[in-house]
Image (spheres, helix red, strand yellow):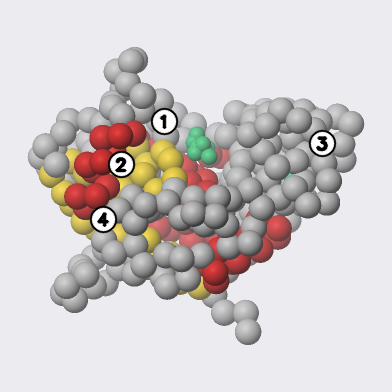
Amino acid sequence: VNAVITIPVVVHVIHNGDAVGANENISNARVLSQITVLNQDFRRMLDTPGYNESEVGADVEIEFCLAQKKPDGTATNGIDRVNLGMASWATESQVEGTLKPQTIWDPTQYFNIWVANFSSSASAELNGILGYAQFPSTSGLGGLASNMGGATTDGVIIDYRCFGTSDIAPSSNYFADYDKGRTATHEIGHCLGLIHIWGDNSSCNVNGTDSNKDYCPDTPAASTENYDCFDVYDSCPSQTGTDMVENYMDYTNDTCMNIFTLNQKARMIAVMNNSIRRASL
Ligand code: ARG
Ligand code: ZN
Ligand code: CA
């Protein structure tokens, strides 16, 4: 059987008392716009914004829906607003040690997405970070650690300025180039076992198993990330293919991205079927 997997999601909107819809306490509409993008991207829906209008990408057959019940069984819209009294978050240890453990819902039952305000102060560790993810355990796949990350921190966290799509007001509250919701697509890719397409490695070596360290032979070898799709880039000219700037697991602008490959799909489905805290979702 080839059934579509639907992942129940809770979006924790971490704020410090702003009105709903203001700054980091983003509106419900904006959260919904992000869920729509995730479904468009993972289901390869046509006519989504993006560089590649053709159908070369995979339909990953994973969908996301906001949770309808809280851990205690009562009704919810899947959006959990929490005032933690912090204007912004400067370090990963604050996020991992305080923000996530204080707000996480059972990660075997819900996929946890946090939206927060990462500090823009130049010295802050999280300044300029769009988001980050916790990887799954290996599930027999190359490139992943065999031990699972912590149960109180599992999921993805995204800066509010790149969460949702900028057709939802206020449009000033978005980072230019990262305003189409593709940061969450990229980070959830990591959470489901995907590695950056350049393998976080400057080598261009390719072999049948590791395929230049992303373990996906159908992503062309690349030795570096790209940030735009204004041109054709070929960071591994001695290898087949040019850099796949349309891939969600590159660093290109949101409007460049429109592809997960079949090998990437296979890794994500394997994680959903085998990894602890993923298979139970
Ligand atoms: N730099 C971040 C990461 O490595 C996310 C990049 C997302 N790119 C984007 N176009 N939204 O996880
Ligand atoms: Zn990444
Ligand atoms: Ca590859």
Callout 3 amino acid = Asn
Q: Is mark 4 within 8 Å of ligand 1?
A: no
Callout 1 amino acid = Ile
Which residue position is annotated with label 1?
129
Measure the C-alpha gap from mark 3 to mark 2: 35 Å
Which residue position is annotated with label 4?
104
Q: Secondary structure at mark 1?
A: loop
Residue found at the very far bottom of the displayed protein:
1
Give the quadrant of residue 203: top right
Measure the C-alpha gap from mark 2 to mark 1: 15 Å
Q: Residue at x 39, y 48 (%)?
A: 156
Q: Earlier in the sequence, mark 3 or mark 2?
A: 2
Image position of 244 (left or right of 14): right
Image position of 226 (left or right of 13): right
Q: Residue at x 49, y 54 (%)?
A: 147
* Res. 116 in view: no
Measure the C-alpha gap from mark 3 to mark 4: 40 Å
- Crowding near pointer 1: few (<14 within 10 Å), some, many (20+)? few
Which residue position is annotated with label 3?
205
Which residue position is annotated with label 2?
96
Q: Earlier in the sequence, mark 3 or mark 1?
A: 1
Image position of 26 (left or right of 62): left
Mark 1 or 4, closer to the camera: 4
Q: Which residue occupies the foreground of this view, 179 or 234?
A: 234
Mark 2 or 1, closer to the camera: 2
- Crowding near pointer 2: few (<14 within 10 Å), some, many (20+)? some
- Crowding near pointer 3: few (<14 within 10 Å), some, many (20+)? some
